[in-house]
Image: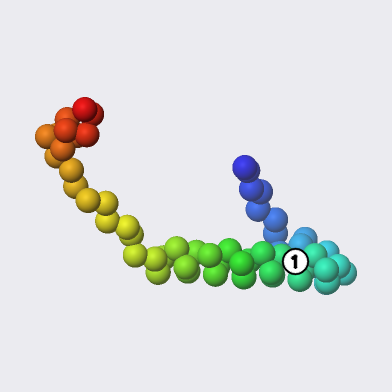
Amino acid sequence: MTGFPIEKSYLKPCLDARHDINDAMKSLLDFRLHKAQLLAEEEPVQTPKRGFLQWLRRRD
């Protein structure tokens, strides 16, 4: 996905004229910020370390 920057001077009149687009963009930004915050707060799951001998035993 490619994003292109849009200057505020061009975007602001469009958002002022179309409040539904403005609200949708705000909702999307809030959603993304909330998800990013949740991901940052999650503790990583520790997987048990297994050695080569355990791997060989499981193959039987």
- As helix, strand or loop, the secondary structure at mark 1 comes to helix
Q: Which of the image's four quarters has the C terminus?
A: top left
Question: Left or right: where does residue 33 sit relative to residue 60?
Answer: right
Quadrant containing the N terminus is: top right
Q: Residue at x 71, y 65 (%)?
A: 25
Residue 18 place in picture, x, y as percent: 86, 67
Percent of width and height locating residue 3 = 64, 48
Q: Disc 1 residue type? A: Ala
Residue 16's x, y, as percent? 83, 72
The residue at 69%/69% (across/down) is: 27
Q: Which residue lies at the image location 40% right of the left edge and 69% below the top edge? A: 41
| 46 w.r.t. 50: above or below | below
Residue 28 visible: yes
Q: Is residue 13 visible?
A: no
> How is colour applied across the structure in the image?
rainbow
Given the current orientation, which residue lies at the most extreme front position?
Answer: 60
The outermost residue toward the top is 60
Q: Quadrant of residue 12?
A: bottom right
When the figure is inspected, residue 58 is found, relative to residue 42, above or below; the finding is above
On the image, numbered disc 1 is attached to which residue?
A: 24
